[in-house]
Amino acid sequence: MRASSPFAVSDAASDLRELRLALIANWTSLLTELLGKPARRTARQWRWNRRGSLSAVVSGAKVGTWFDHERGIGGGPFELIAREHGSDWRDAADWARRWLGMPDWQASGQRPDATAPAVTAAIDSASAPDPAAAWEAQRRQFAQRAAIISWERAVPADPAHGYLQRKGVVMHGLRMESEGVLIVPLVDINGTIHTLQRIYEDGTKRYLAGGAKAGHFTVVGGPLAEAEAILICEGWATGATAHEATGLQVVAAMDAGNLKRVAPILRERFPTARLVVLADNDTKPGRVDNPGVTAAIAAARAAGALVAIPPEPGDFNDLAAARGLEAVREVIAAAEPPPQPLPTYTLASLDLVGARAVLEDRIADFMAEVAAYWTADPLEAELAPQPGPPAWAVPTGAEILPGAACS
């Protein structure tokens, strides 16, 4: 048997890593494709009850792994595909490339040799619990590729989708994957897709594993190039509501933490546009802080924008549901500059001994002034020269009116 070229082995190993990370970036869609809707779902883990109690990690360091608690087996994406299709990892890799819309194996057209050490290491690393530290840059790249592929394969969203119906908005260009999952593309200021958010019918939201969200956003209501005013908000549904109420273009930063990153980017690109940051009013009983309002004010200050805050707890979609689009329009029209931050003062740098010494000196000076006041001679005080009027109150010779001088 002829030995494999080291370059071919290296390329094959790289292809497997790339394929694995692309599968992890689409992990929740892959799980739904292979296993159907989960019986139980949390922010960190999904579970299915068929064929044993199977769980899959959908967030955190171990995202992309699964385990069948009844059979005592588990692994990563390749192992799950092979298990569900009754094939080996090579057939699983072929299926994965077709499912992702990726091209067939390159070069000679031969699939990776399972006996090559580099390929074996790549397969083993496919089940590694935490590859993110070593492959963070690659994960962003592969997540971006997966996002573009997913967006291109998706179809226009169904207007009757449960999430859209509950939010009371239309689809505004959203697309939908084959299993009925809405996808929201996150782009940069030039319109390049970097990652995406998936919205399930029950309202659960997921981002692509490894995708770059910071500083990226989605646009509702058309291109921004000619916009005279741009609204900036957190979630997509809030953006859809704001656009329907005002007709203005809206940028959804997806969460409060991203508002301050996105707003200055928009200000730099559109220096003359009227920017309005739409806050989420996160007021809750017994809660002192209001993270949504705080984030919106910080973003508005950073970008020289106005800020609009719903008068009641909730976001602008909640306001529309409670009081209609006209109420949303009125609050946005009344947007104001953000309040100025409170002044800050430098704290004293004295230690306890130093502070006590300064205080004793001040007290001694004060007591000396008090003693001087009570022991002063009243007659001396009466005979002491009295201060005259200030210089600005004394008229010059040219300003004295004729006849005003005494004869």
Image (cartoon, helix red, strand yellow):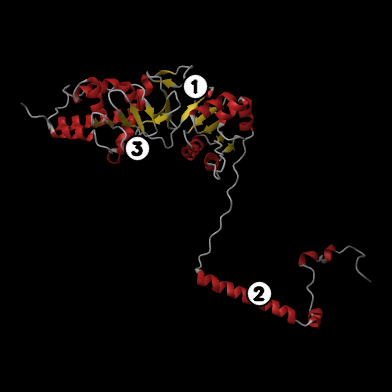
Residue found farthest to the left: 1
| Foreground tag (1 vs 2) | 1
Give me the C-alpha separation between circle 1 and circle 2: 72 Å
Closest to the observer: 188 or 316? 316
Quadrant of the image for the N terminus?
Answer: top left
Local packing at callout 2 (Cα closer than 10 Å; few below 14, some 14-19, many 20+) is few
Q: Where residue 391 sits: x, y (%)?
A: 77, 67
The amino acid type found where label 2 is placed reads: Phe
The amino acid type found where label 3 is placed reads: Gly
In the image, residue 28 above or below residue 138: above
Residue 103 in sight in this render? no
Local packing at callout 1 (Cα closer than 10 Å; few below 14, some 14-19, many 20+) is some
Mark 2, secondary structure of its residue:
helix
The residue pinned by badge 3 equals: 60
Q: Earlier in the sequence, mark 2 or mark 3?
A: 3
Residue drawn at (57%, 40%), measured in percent from left and top? 285
Quadrant of the image for the C terminus?
Answer: bottom right
In the image, taking residue 4 as reference, residue 286 lies left or right, namely right
| Foreground tag (2 vs 3) | 3
Q: Which of marks 1 and 2 is nearer the N terminus?
A: 1
The residue pinned by badge 1 equals: 164
Mark 3, secondary structure of its residue:
loop
Give me the C-alpha separation between circle 2 and circle 3: 64 Å
Residue found farthest to the right: 407
The residue pinned by badge 2 equals: 366
Q: Where residue 262 sits: x, y (%)?
A: 47, 37
Q: Earlier in the sequence, mark 3 or mark 1?
A: 3
